[in-house]
Amino acid sequence: MFLAFALITLLGALGMLLQKNIIVAGLFMVAAFFGIAGLFVLLANPVAAALQIIVYSGAIMVLVLFVIMMLNSHEEEAAEFSRPIQRWLSLALVLALAVGAVKLVMASKGVQELAVRGAATSPAVTLQGVGAVLFADHLLGFEVAGLMLLAAMVGAVALTKRNL
Amino acid sequence: MDTLASLLHTSPAIAWMAVKIVIVFGGIFTLAAVFTWVERRGSAMIQDRIGPNRAALFGRIRIIGLQQLLADGLKFLFKEDLAPTDANKGLFWLAPFLAFVPAMLGFAVIPFGRSFVSGGTTYHLSVLDPGNGMGMLYPLAIGGMAVYGVLVAAWSSNNKWSILGGMRASAAMVSYEIGMSLAVVALFMTTGGYDPKDIIAAQGYLPWHWNVVPHFLGFIVFFTCMFAETNRLPFDFAEGESEIVAGFNTEYGSMKFSLLALAEYGHMMTASALIATLYFGGWQVPFVQNPTVALSITSFVLKLVFFAWVFVWIRWTLPRFRYDQLMHLGWKVMLPMSMVNLVFHAWRMSQGH
């Protein structure tokens, strides 16, 4: 199961990068989001999986595709000249980042404890649990995020409607 | 169940799962197909016509025209399968499935009858057992996926009418979804759980305790949004045949069109089941405290068919809205209404009710 979802995620992401047609690339991204939702379910967190699908593939990607269709340019423009140095540099950076991330995860406390104690199946996360954690432990962060989103919304309206 | 499982060399749990999947998807599929006929007969009834009543088996046996279904299916199967020259072929093929699969999947968490105990094991009458952690979030998530079928069908046809229909669908979807979700959140709050089993159990068997009474505002919002979600008339501007030919399915013919149409009716069934579960007590039988399993299933199916009929009824009663009118309705009427509903119930709960 893990392999299947991981493959969906990775192939979706790869397809998004390599696809020249922007709309098809967007659909590949939806597939990648689905893979991530599946991984969340395997991590005993169905709430995150549902929210992933509702928020990312249900709302954000629909808006993104809507904007792409509005702009009506479905093909990526070709670069004026190739940039071999930047290409190899970016590849090297991505590799370094990936190796570093894997090393960090493997060296982390949680993984080491896991090796000692063995995996205990944690109970599935519920919506009630998420709500309690959000409003009891992380109330400040939650409110700040809400305020920032409100400010962003007001800013967007002010930018698009000059004469209110 | 155990003998069946041993005959098939599987465990009883898997056999029961397979039986449930066959019952649920077979049932939804059949109901969706029957409702394509009910729609035509119903529209005829409402417009004082007769409607399709001539189709007959072997030219003899007419059962009020029900064979029309078979005739339609055969006709769709044998029609030539055309795809426009400039269409994106892969996506053009994929789109009917993208539309059809979410329409069927949404039903999976909805209990269609009472759970019962037999031989020491509890059998739940829903494809996904309660306590799966997704609960009512699952149909909402899957419902959000439905727009991709329309969007992909619209874009891949490479036809300006189709693209107009797809863009209308996606723009409309963003504007009604928040109001709908808030209406459901208020339900989660008063129930104290988000599993359909909890929501049904909390409603009880007395009709005036069903959620439709305390959550009347939320019910109106949810009910209206279901019409937008299923792309049905007052809000079917993704299709809008008097304005943009046939909208997103202009270029579709034969079995692919049939799948798109069945997806619409499948979605209608899921939406009716959601309305029945959330606001009308699901499988609860009015005034019967502990109904038998058969009675509870009958009650659920009756509610489902009734709401599906309301969909047909409203389609042939109301004229189509303009598409900016739904945006207006979504943002300026339904969102405030479900906000009021949410805050009112939060206030009531804080007062200790």
Image (spheres, coloured by chain):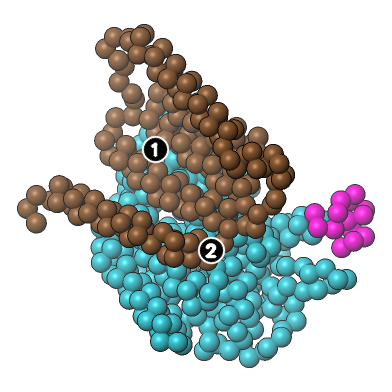
Label 1 sits on a secondary structure element that is helix
Magenta stretch contains residue B8: yes
At horizontal 47% and vertical 21% (from top left) the residue drawn is A96
At horizontal 51% and vertical 38% (from top left) the residue drawn is A31
Q: Nearer the viewer, residue B158 or B41?
A: B158
Please give the label number shown on residue A129.
2
Whether B297 is drawn above or below B352: the answer is: above
Colour for chain B in the figure: cyan
Which mark's residue is nearer the viewer, 2 or 1? 2
At horizontal 81% and vertical 73% (from top left) the residue drawn is B117
As drawn, is B310 to the left or to the right of A39?
left
Residue at image mark 1: B155
Please give the label number shown on residue A111.
none
As drawn, is B322 to the left or to the right of A88?
left
Whether B155 is drawn above or below B175: the answer is: above
Disc 2 marks which amino acid?
Gly
Whether A113 is drawn above or below B335: the answer is: above
- Expressed as whole percent of the image width and height from the top left, the position of residue B131 reads 65, 64
What is the distance, in whole Å, between disc 2 and disc 1 at their CAs? 41 Å
